[in-house]
Amino acid sequence: MAAEINNVAQDYAKIIQSADLDREISPLCTNIEDMLARLDEFETLLSSVRAESNGIMANHVCSILSFSDNFDELRTRIDNLEAFVGRVSANLNDVERSVDVAEQELNVTDYSLKGLLFKPLKAKLTATDPATAQPQPRTNLLDGEFQPVRIYSSDEYFGAPAAPEEPQVA
């Protein structure tokens, strides 16, 4: 058994002596050195980013905190703007209904310039007897006079415009 162990040991010794360790380990060392250089560059970049982000955070956090007093005013202004947009939308719907009624009263179906100008005039000239005409359920007229749709006043939402100051003469 000792002879076999001795033979195996001699075989391993020949293999190790025949192997060129420099040639096999050199690429590994080169790769490790390259990785260490890249890791060092990455660490430098990371510290630079940290320093820059800390500076940005210090500057912007202070400005955000100083603006916090204005957040209530900003929220109120946004709420007022949303209410304004809702009111304008409702007014637009009312005006569109009024236009639909006016088109129905004037019997306008042709939206060309010719149809818009001449058809209502022609309808008035060829109007039938009011007693036999079908009653129209909706109208924009009150006592024979057009009643426009009441729309918003921007002063309700944005305040009255400031009066310009008059220059003082010396």
Image: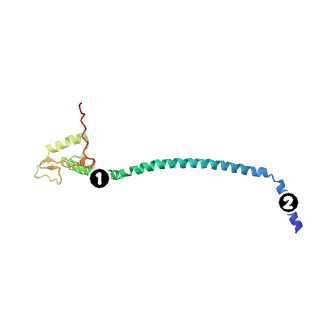
Q: Nearer the viewer, residue 41 or 80?
A: 41
Give residue 11's mark. Answer: 2
- Which residue shows up at 22% across the image and 42% down it? 116
* Mark 1 Cα shell of 10 Å, populated few (<14), some (14-19), many (≥20): few
Q: Position of residue 82 (x, y in %)?
A: 31, 52
- Which residue shows up at 20% across the image and 43% down it? 119
Give residue 133's mark. Answer: none
Judged from the image, the secondary structure of the residue bearing numbered disc 2 is: helix
Where does the N terminus fall, quadrant-wise? bottom right
Question: Which of the two labelled residues, at mark 2 and mark 1, occupies the earlier sequence position?
Answer: 2
Q: Position of residue 68 (x, y in %)?
A: 38, 52
- Which residue shows up at 66% across the image and 47% down it? 37
Q: Are marks 2 and 1 in contact (CB under 8 Å)?
A: no
Q: Position of residue 84 (x, y in %)?
A: 28, 50
Location of residue 134 with respect to 6 vertically, above or below: above
Location of residue 38 with respect to 113 vertically, above or below: below
Location of residue 163 with respect to 85 vertically, above or below: above
Q: CA distance from mark 2 to mark 1?
A: 93 Å
Q: How many marks?
A: 2
Q: Amino acid at mark 1?
A: Ala
Q: Position of residue 57 (x, y in %)?
A: 48, 50
Q: Amino acid at mark 2?
A: Asp
* Mark 2 Cα shell of 10 Å, populated few (<14), some (14-19), many (≥20): few
The residue at which mark 1 appears reads as 83
Does residue 17 appear left or right of residue 64 in this picture?
right
| Farthest residue, direction front | 170
Q: Nearer the viewer, residue 80 or 62?
A: 62
